[in-house]
Image (tube, grey):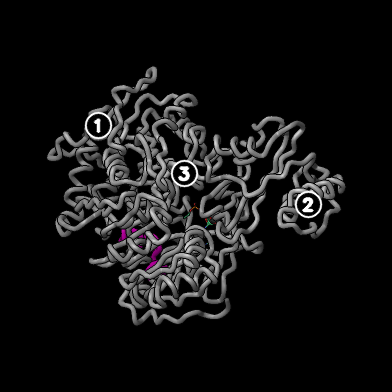
Amino acid sequence: MTGIYPKINPQSINANLGLKQHFDLTKSFENDHFGTWSKLAREELFWHKDFETCFSQKEYPFFSWFEGGKTNISYNCLDKNLEKNSQKTAIQFINSNQEETNLSYRELHQRVIQFSNYLKKLGIKKRDFICLYMPLSCEAVIAMLAIVRIGAIHNIVFAGFSATALAERIRDTKSDWVITADLAYRKGKELSLLETCLEARDESDFKNIIVYNRSGNCEISSLEKSGLKFYKFENYLSEDFTKDSIEWLDAEDPSFVLYTSGSTGKPKGLVHSTGGYSLWAKLSTRWVFDLKENDKYWCTADIGWITGHTYLVYGPLLNGATCFFYEDAPDFPNKNIFWQLIEKYKITIFYTAPTAIRTFMQWQKDHPITQDLSSLRLLGSVGEPINPKAWKWFYEVIGNSRCPIVDTWWQTETGGIMITSLIGVDDMKPGKAGRALPGIEVFTDTDNKLYIKKPFPSLARTINGNPARYLNAYWNNEHKAYLAGDSALIDEDGYVELQGRIDDVINVSGHRLGTAEIESSIIKAPHVSEAAVVSIPHEIKGETIIVFAVTNGATTKDEINEQIKDDIGSFAKPEEIFLCKALPKTRSGKIMRRLLKDIGLRKFPEGDISTLEDSKVIEALIEVVKQQL
Ligand code: WTA
């Protein structure tokens, strides 16, 4: 879509960050980058002890923000809001049966103190890693806030990951503790999370497990596993809430680690800080979502992804907002459930993903949206580019051509939103995410690689246990800047149009997956000697996985699917699998993925194939694909 469509006059919106404030802030960053960050940090966060230096760097690229300062995210989310908002609803949770739980700031504060006392009593200390494998629930939010309150480090693993993937993440942090639920409800089915954790125990050696009795029928006294100790989650409710076990943390103490896919088979555990992360979670939420006193804010992400961390839990709570969330899928119990919830609970801000938007567009054909969505005032999108067709539908059908859309670009690494259009400042340009937020400077090189120029407080500090990989993946470049891993074009107004990844990371339904990760799983299937994974565009999922597996025996596609399900999870299931005898390679042995992509798209491979070692391989592959039609 060309031009600006449609025109919302930013000046007509009384936004938290309007034109004047934006102008002043941008100037202030230009004049004194670090002075401005210091000022914001002091204004926004409670510091138990003030920091001495804003920014320091001992060894490139490892930097520190707000050194000398002591604070706590949980305190900033809860205690800091008690004076003004103690009776206000902090979280409103709707479970699969449409039952509602509301916790005010006062109640959430008490529960978090109780749970943190419980964790301390169980012997958990500052800097211990705790793995969470939980359904979306109030209990998961309580656990997160309690863990950071005592200075332990949460490692949330999305509950769709398999036992093997879970075990790998537990091993990488050498965690002794797992918190899970007996089960999760998904589309009328029961998923046994506890069983998956027990399977993961066979491949890792955590020693303790806290089980939330989601079903109401879990009898942990009857469970046994050699050397594994079981604790009931619910026991926290008998802990004292008048005695607080808060730890005042250094600004640079880690708050959490979150694993994401990179270019190799091994996921990266990105380590986030305490001070810098919470400062940006707070500011970016208030600026981008324009949170006001009476907003009802719904972010549809799961806590297992960074969006769930920053914009379901920490960002909104740091701002004293009311966060709404729903336990089940968007098509359970029916395909209009999201609109029914928006109508019933008068949601004002709705933040979701393009893949969901495209799915809603499809469903709407048979399930007309008749609900009253007039409470909405702002819509948001994250995870992949939102194509203009989906943008237009979201804008017109869900937002009734009234609500601005913020298309937010960011990453697990950046901790918070870097690029978007601000509703009080910028026009929207569908297909382009927008401009960099104040304090953030982006640029592209001659290959259109996107970089962030200066360090900023919310950037992940390292990769758990692998600082060399952190340096190489992001900082080892001639610009001495943070390499984002995306390709982009920046227009004359500074609007960034994202064009996908430049590395071997693919984005299926907003889930980031490494091709190397999937390939190393496939070659474990019987008789598979080699595999190549490529992605091709998909109308709903954005991208989808195509597998080429070289087999020298009777491998079935089901076996490959099973292997991926076992190693990663069902969400990584390929769209198509082609069993073949050889892969196209260069003379130096590199797989020519570009050719495989073309074949997956049913196109005769275009471009130069002179480097191909054996051109017959292509003909054979085309035959395989034809036979599969
Ligand atoms: C992609 C999710 C275009 C991008 C918050 C990035 C986007 C990766 C957008 C990070 C957007 C995210 N437009 N692409 N608005 N938002 N991406 O770590 O490729 O799961 O590098 O973080 O998603 O995915 P991650």
Is residue 56 in view from this perspective? yes
| Front tag of 1 and 2 | 2
Q: Position of residue 410 (x, y in %)?
A: 47, 58
Instruction: Write the residue at 56% across / 53% down.
Output: 507
Is residue 180 in view from this perspective? no
Mark 3 element type: strand
Give me the disc on residue 270. 3
Q: Amino acid at mark 3?
A: Leu
How dense is the environment of label 1, judged by Cα within 10 Å: few (below 14), some, or many (20 and up)? some
| Front tag of 2 and 3 | 2
- Magenta region: 28-42
Disc 1 to disc 2, C-alpha distance:
61 Å
Which residue appears farthest toward the top when viewing the image?
A: 226
Q: Amino acid at mark 1?
A: Lys
Query: Which residue matches tag 1?
Result: 120
Instruction: Write the residue at 56% across / 64% down.
Output: 498
Q: Is residue 172 left or right of residue 375?
A: right
Instruction: Write the residue at 37% across / 39% down.
Output: 154
Mark 2 element type: helix
Give me the disc on residue 396. none
Whether label 2 lies within 8 Å of ligand 1 gets the answer no
Disc 3 to disc 1, C-alpha distance:
25 Å
Mark 1 element type: helix
Rendered view: 281 above or below 368: above
Q: Amino acid at mark 2?
A: Lys
Disc 2 to disc 3, C-alpha distance:
42 Å
How dense is the environment of label 3, judged by Cα within 10 Å: few (below 14), some, or many (20 and up)? many
Query: Which residue matches tag 2?
Result: 626
